[in-house]
Amino acid sequence: MTKNNGFPVERALISVSDKAGLAEFARRLELLGIEIVSTGGTATYLRDSGIPVRPVSEITNFPEILEGRVKTLHPAIHGAILANLDLSSTRAALAAHGMVPIGLVVINLYPFEQAAKQHASDIGMMVEKIDIGGAALLRGAAKNHAFVTAVSDPSDYGLVLEELARNGRRTTLKTRRSLAAKAFARVAAYDSAIAAWFASTSGETETESFSITGKLRQKLRYGENPHQSAALYEVQDRTGPSIVAAEQVQGKELSYNNIVDADAALELISEFQEERPSIAIIKHANPCGVATGETLADAYRKAVACDTVSAFGGIVASNRILDEETAKEILRIFTEVVIAPSATPEAKQVFSTKPNTRLLLTGSLLPLGKRSPSFRSVSGGFLVQDADLGSVDDQTLRTVTKREPTPQEHSDMIFAMKIAKHVRSNAIVFAKGGATLGIGAGQMSRVDSVRLAVWKATNAATAAEKDAHAALSASAVASDAFFPFPDGVIAAADAGATAIIQPGGSLRDEAVIAAADERGLAMVLTGVRHFRH
């Protein structure tokens, strides 16, 4: 490998789909005395901008063929890019074939990812968006970075021009190596998107290999703890609303934990697409209060009443446009992040009085019917699973007790189960009248989750309802998985619950149902478990 900053760039090959900043970049190259070689639309664009361009066909002595599918796939191009100029034999071979080394390769690939967002079902169109020549050029240039500068991102034009001008048409080895890494990462992400699209067209959910690629969105101050480094990446095929793409109207930089909690809040509030105004409050990735109301402010007051202690420093998510009254209610206590589809100018003005509070606007809620797979790292690998899109279906609900639930109990059970999906297992949710009363999360036994929910409800009860039975009277209980023993049902009944919704499937279902009948409860089974570890 050459020990210096390489050889002066005599010739550059440019072929890009994104023309941003290209004319000025190419004009500066021309002023530096660098010959520009180009193809197709890029060549036309540069000529129209008054920049001399030499067509690739003059270098290869071969025309573009197959409707442009083959342009640069030729030894005269790839030999000029892959030449090891430290070898006298290579320099002799180049001279023998009249080849000038290409020291700068500027490529951005056909916009496959963007096309996949709009035309994924159009197989013919998608196939034509697969860039072959461009990827090969980038790989060759990046491989031979000892002598060639590979530019795959227009944001690097300024850096490259500055070094070429300062160093006599040379770039530094450090820069070439950095740009080579970026080029290979771009090609890897591109190939990953293509592989994912092919898998989706074939209906495969489990492929022989699985790639996760993303673009750096934000370097974070630290991870879950100050001694951990962290960064936020945006997946290349993202579509629709997300925490990553949300507009941050104001507030401090989001932390790792803020992002995790905000994502959990957005997922939960998205369960309430067609509901009345609804609010969800999240703390450490668990709901601590959820409610619907006549107004958004009413929903917030009911949600925060479930657990006023945990709501402090929490994440608040709304399913409606934030209004001024709700903004004022939220800011009565310290709140880390507020998420909503949008906010009125008056609400934004209220939030501006607390400049450290982060306000995120997502544009809309997450779609209920389709979500990206979820990932989790494990030692030596990672897990991939479909998103939990299971929901309560009245057609499959099965009453197993002697007593049918009343219409109010039925409504409360459905409401509670929507929330239980988003509570860390073991999950128990008491609810009544469109509001959570007590939430038990993350306990090693289900009966302890019931006891925790009862304890929280007791603490949150008004002065007139200081016993758990009064606080939870006529409430409905949702459980994310079956009750393995009757003890959880008994504890819920003793606390005042009158209806229970759960998946069922325990070896002791008969004993659990019998315990419910003995206490006059209504119990329905969903047949669908919602563990959330």
Image (spheres, rainbow, N blue to C red):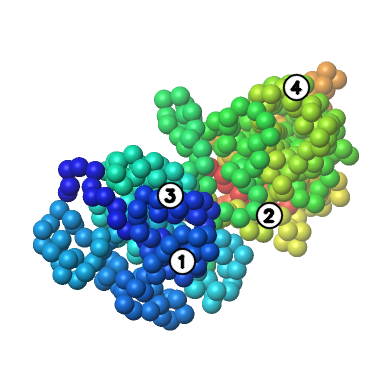
**Residue shown at 43%/81% (left/top)?**
66
CA gap, disc 2 and disc 1 = 42 Å
CA gap, disc 1 and disc 4 = 53 Å
Of marks 2 and 4, which one's residue comes earlier in the chain? 4
Furthest-top residue in view?
463
Furthest-left residue in view?
89
Element carrying mark 2: loop
CA gap, disc 4 and disc 3 = 48 Å
Q: Amino acid at mark 3?
A: Arg
Element carrying mark 1: helix
Quarter-of-image position of residue 57 = bottom left
Instruction: Say which residue label 1 marks.
Output: 43
Of marks 3 and 2, which one's residue comes earlier in the chain? 3
Task: Say whether residue 232 is left or right of residue 8.
Answer: right
Q: Residues within 10 Å of mark 1 (few under 14, many from 20)?
A: many
**Residue shown at 55%/74% (left/top)?**
125
Instruction: Say which residue label 3 marks.
Output: 28
Instruction: Say which residue label 2 marks.
Output: 367
Image location (x, y in percent) of residue 16: 46, 61
Task: Say whether residue 495 is left or right of residue 200.
Answer: right
Q: Residues within 10 Å of mark 2 (few under 14, many from 20)?
A: some
CA gap, disc 2 and disc 4 = 33 Å
Viewer-nearest residue: 32 or 453: 32
Task: Say whether residue 205 is left or right of residue 277.
Answer: left
Image location (x, y in percent) of residue 340: 73, 40
Q: Amino acid at mark 1?
A: Ala
| Disc number placed over residue 353 in the picture, else none | 4
Asked whether disc 4 touches disc 3, contact meaning CB atoms under 8 Å apart, the reply is: no
Asked whether disc 2 touches disc 1, contact meaning CB atoms under 8 Å apart, the reply is: no
